[in-house]
Image (spheres, helix red, strand yellow):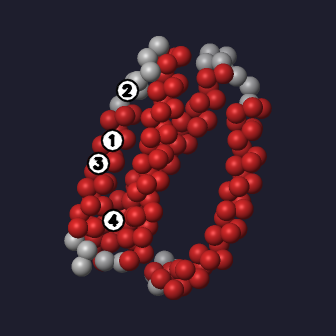
Amino acid sequence: MFSYFANPERFERLARVVTPWAWGVAAALFAIGLPWALVISPPDYQQSETVRIMYVHVPSAWLAMAAYAGLGVSSFIYFIWRHNLADLAARALAPAGAVFAALCLATGALWGRPMWGALVGVGCAPDLHAGAAASVSGLYGAARRHRG
């Protein structure tokens, strides 16, 4: 099935049909989930209202890592087989990964302030995001440099 959609014309035909539906489902889930997480959910017994930051921080971390993983896989595919859809996917995932990583680090720092009294992140999370960004960006840069 994946090789069927490796053809850019077939993929674009499918994407034209699926994209409006995906945007609609995403908007509906966002409209339901955001108020539920940030307004309706009760405060934590230990963290009180600051637990709501985790409802943004944790998904941002997951999405950043998923974007980095997708960027690495698509860059590898482009680097080996020179498939143009893999290059387009890598170009689309690079800024998304950077935005989600920045959001994750910012919300982690905001959550750390009331919890530990420090604005900066604690632990290895900033190093993990920086290391993932550097290694995947290196593969992405190598694939883009050897375009041919």
Name the element at disc 2. Answer: loop
Horizontally, is 101 left or right of 75 in the view? right
In the rendered structure, which amino acid carries the disc numbered 3? Ala
Circle 3/circle 2 CB separation < 8 Å: no
Q: Which residue is mark 4?
A: 75
Residue 58 percent coordinates (x, y): 54, 38
In the rendered structure, which amino acid carries the disc numbered 2? Gly
Front residue of 50/81: it is 50
In the rendered structure, which amino acid carries the disc numbered 4? Ser
Whole-number angstrom distance, CA of label 1 to CA of label 3? 6 Å
Q: Which residue is mark 3?
A: 134
Q: In this picture, is 8 found above or below 53? A: below
State the residue at coordinates (62%, 15%).
Answer: 46
Whole-number angstrom distance, CA of label 4 to CA of label 3? 14 Å
Whole-number angstrom distance, CA of label 2 to CA of label 4? 29 Å
Whole-number angstrom distance, CA of label 4 to CA of label 1? 18 Å
Ranked by sequence position, the earlier of labels 2 and 1 is 2
Name the element at disc 1. Answer: helix
Circle 4/circle 1 CB separation < 8 Å: no
State the residue at coordinates (71%, 60%).
Answer: 25
Ranked by sequence position, the earlier of labels 4 and 3 is 4
Residue 13 percent coordinates (x, y): 59, 82
Circle 2/circle 4 CB separation < 8 Å: no
